[in-house]
Amino acid sequence: RENNLFIWKDGLSTRVTDDGGDNLFNGALGWPDALWFSPDGEYLAFLKFDETEVPTYTMTSYMAKQRVAPTYPNERLVKYAKAGENISTVTFHLLEVNSPSAPRKIDFQTYAPDDLIITESGDAQVVRERDGTDGWLENYFAITCEFSVPGYIPGLSTPAYVDISDHSGWAHIYLYPVSGGEPIPLTSGNWEVTAIYSVDVKRGLIHYQSTECDSTERHIFTVSLDGKTKNALMDITKDGYYDASFSPGGGYYTLSYKGPNLPWQVLRRIGSDTPIRVTNDNASLKNKLSAYSLPIISWSTLKHPDGYELNLMERLPPKFRKGKKYPVLFDIYGGPGSQRTEKTFRRTVDFSAYLGSDPELEYIVVTVDSRGTGYKGRKFRTMVAGQLGKLEAEDQVWAAREYAKRDYVDGEKIAIWGGSYGGYLTGKVLELDSGAFSLGIMTAPVTD
């Protein structure tokens, strides 16, 4: 509030910073993460952004949140650093949650490079090796803990750690003995583990997120440290995209449903499906959405003659009429390891939803995840290695031609656009000059 931080505890809101203003932001800015709680919840770390020395830029808005463009555009002054100009001054601060009135500024003499590992001794041992000729080596950042596991894994009495690896072709959980040797798989199959939330050594459980039901979905599972027992923490017979957060002791967790329908969140106890509390049901958002006509959304796959499948998300106008041919917009991204067809609520109410639901536009908006995108196995993900922009562009052209065969599609009016890597990919598609698309728009493309 007012660019200051507050802590809400036991129904009481306490201000912890008081210097927030037009040029100074505490814990929030155009930044993915700027504040973090410690694992035990006792401390809060946050960044403070000072934009005083950043030059001012005039931003023009031609609609100014009005249905009809005003006679004169709205102009707003914003702090915006162009190349070579001053950027924000950022400082790091730490406060105790139980004593929030005095956050401390933490000064750093230097920053450790990402390629250094600081150890207490000079001893080192090769735990595993990987061949990176089909792409690049990437740390999943899933290494969770080191522990001795006699009693859980027959014959294993040395310390071990849990990590995610895709050396089988699919990203799965493995138990790696610290002394080296063959890793022990705890999950397997033609699907991928996307996150490890918690390793509960006391209960012998690992809580994780995966694509076991579908590559466009995420469900939460628990597997025992011996890999013999696996349970889902929700009904996996229904489509869904779930996330979770576990307490430090592993006894409680928040389960967050993120789509494709209206999101909700509940607090649960491990071993029980009955919520302790509904922490968010989004009732207010539900009421607001009832006033809007949203697109008809579906997910499917396109089977390529070369044997692979491409995920497709289709948004039809809310008043879709059979017999009418509609213009189509391919809204793409296609970056390595990414996904834009996931079944999340935020994908159903974005700008593409507006393009499909506005009665004066009524576009069909399609998103296709081409080769090189994520969550469909290592082979699918690494096909683009050494040739970025080639296979992805070919896939978008092929998908457009296939989609144009549908009786409700105007094949002469298929456009394509994307931002960032999607802008670059749009350019590579137009470069093919295939005739599949009649228009392309590149937004902030990654180009030379």
Image (cartoon, grey):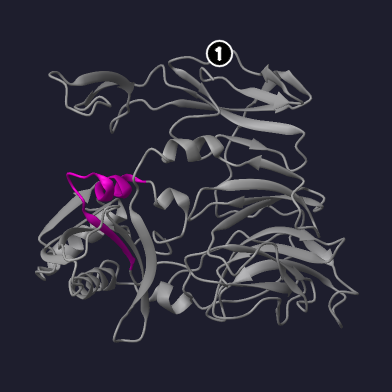
Q: Say which residue label 1 marks.
A: 19
Of 176 and 340, the residue lying toward us: 340
With respect to residue 272, does 59 lie above or below?
above
Instruction: Report the residue at 18% width, 65% height from top.
Output: 429
Image coordinates for residue 146, horizontal then vertical, percent: 78, 62
- In this rendering, would 34 be left or right of 181? left
Instruction: Report the residue at 83% width, 64% height from top.
Output: 147
- In this rendering, would 317 be left or right of 41? left
Quadrant in which residue 84 is drawn: top left
Quadrant in which residue 234 is drawn: bottom right
Q: Is residue 126 visible?
A: no
- In this rendering, would 403 be left or right of 92? left
As shown in the figure, which amino acid type bears the numbered disc 1? Asp
Of 89 and 63, the residue lying toward us: 63
Image quadrant holding the N terminus, namely: top right
Question: Which region of the structure is painted magenta?
Answer: 350-369
Which residue, as the protein is rendered here, is positioned at the far right? 151
| SS type, badge 1 | loop
- The question of residue 394 being in magenta is answered with no
- The question of residue 364 being in magenta is answered with yes
Q: Residues within 10 Å of mark 1 (few under 14, many from 20)?
A: some
Instruction: Report the residue at 24% width, 44% height from top.
Output: 358
Image coordinates for residue 392, horizontal then vertical, percent: 28, 69
Q: Is residue 212 visible?
A: yes
Quadrant in which residue 422 is drawn: bottom left
Image coordinates for residue 283, horizontal then vertical, percent: 55, 38
With respect to residue 441, does 209 lie above or below?
below
